[in-house]
Image (cartoon, rainbow, N blue to C red):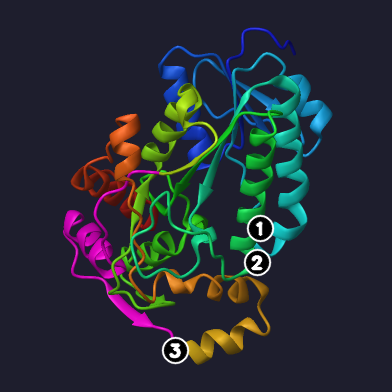
Amino acid sequence: MTTSNVSHVIVGAGPVGTALARLLAAEGEPVRVVTRSGRDIGVAGVEAIALDASDADALTEVAKNAQVLYNCANPGAYQAWERQWPPLATAILTAAERTDAVLVTASNLYGYGPVTEPMTRSTELRPSDHKGALRVRMWQEALASHQAGRARVTEARSSDYIGPGLPISSGLLARYADATLSGKTAAVFADPDQPHTWTAIEDVAATLAALGRDEQAWGSAWIVPSDPPQSVRQVLRSLHERCSLPGPKLRQVPWWILRTGGLFIPLLREVTGVLYQFDAPFIADGSETTEYLGIAPTPWEQIIDSTAAAWRARAA
């Protein structure tokens, strides 16, 4: 392995990391993707590296000549976050400090906690559970490094993902759709009729790439541009219409069942900690990002068309 001729190093090959690698490679940029397995993501011009990214020395070597280092990692199950995220985030930040690569992090909206207004860049961070608090700490540590002149950092915050390449395990919407598109009733964990922002995976990738290039954007967090909010029921209904299927069948699980189940099932307990995002309007306003970076969200009809075809094929 050589460390020459690499402009972009991406940690993580999930939906966002893969979409980002595809975007950068299509622009002719040298890209290296770091995962534990080192699996080939199937994108021409992208080098796959097998590495434990929580090893700061090894990651520093891989990113030695990179212009931008992207944190697109996802430690997996919520209950593993407190154990896996801190050493991983610290190592990635350390590598950015040592190499002078710009650190661009793919993050979420957990840090804002329950909100009553659309979230913007100026919305106060007020996490209500440990996952949001962890994300806030990660950002504050990176920002402190930036302000001290040790690193150059920025962050893109997106809402729940939607898109054809989204795995079933990557969100509640994908799980619900997997059930309804196969003719079953989906057991939904919160109010399916509350407006909710959905972010296209390709729009996350486009925002990350743009942030890595614009030094005026560094030292701040940005909301990924997304289409107007749609409730869970509205999204599922649109997917069914594209597939010429009857409307989706939904059954809301009572809160007391979720709470009781959370006493025995760790993952369920973690999920209930963020259900406030679906029991009330949860809206992200990325218009400032659009205005500054020139990134507009993918048209909703286009997202629904591509997602319906892929998810229907998977469900079948």
Please give left or right for residue 90 compared with residue 16 in the image. right
Q: From mark 3 to mark 2, how far is it between C-alphas? A: 24 Å
In contact (CB < 8 Å): disc 3 and disc 2: no
**Residue beneath label 3, please?**
254
Say which element carries label 2. Answer: helix
In contact (CB < 8 Å): disc 2 and disc 1: yes
Q: Nearer the viewer, residue 80 or 116?
A: 116
Amino acid tagged 1? Leu
Q: Nearer the viewer, residue 185 or 157?
A: 157
Q: Quadrant of the N terminus?
A: top right
Please give left or right for residue 43 compared with residue 11 in the image. left
Amino acid tagged 3? Pro
**Residue beneath label 2, please?**
130
User: Which quadrant would residue 58 be assigned to in this image?
Assistant: top right
Q: From mark 2 to mark 1, how far is it between C-alphas? A: 6 Å
Q: Residue at the front extreme?
A: 148
Picture disc at residue 235? none
Amino acid tagged 2? His
Picture disc at residue 134? 1
Q: Position of residue 132 (x, y in %)?
A: 59, 61
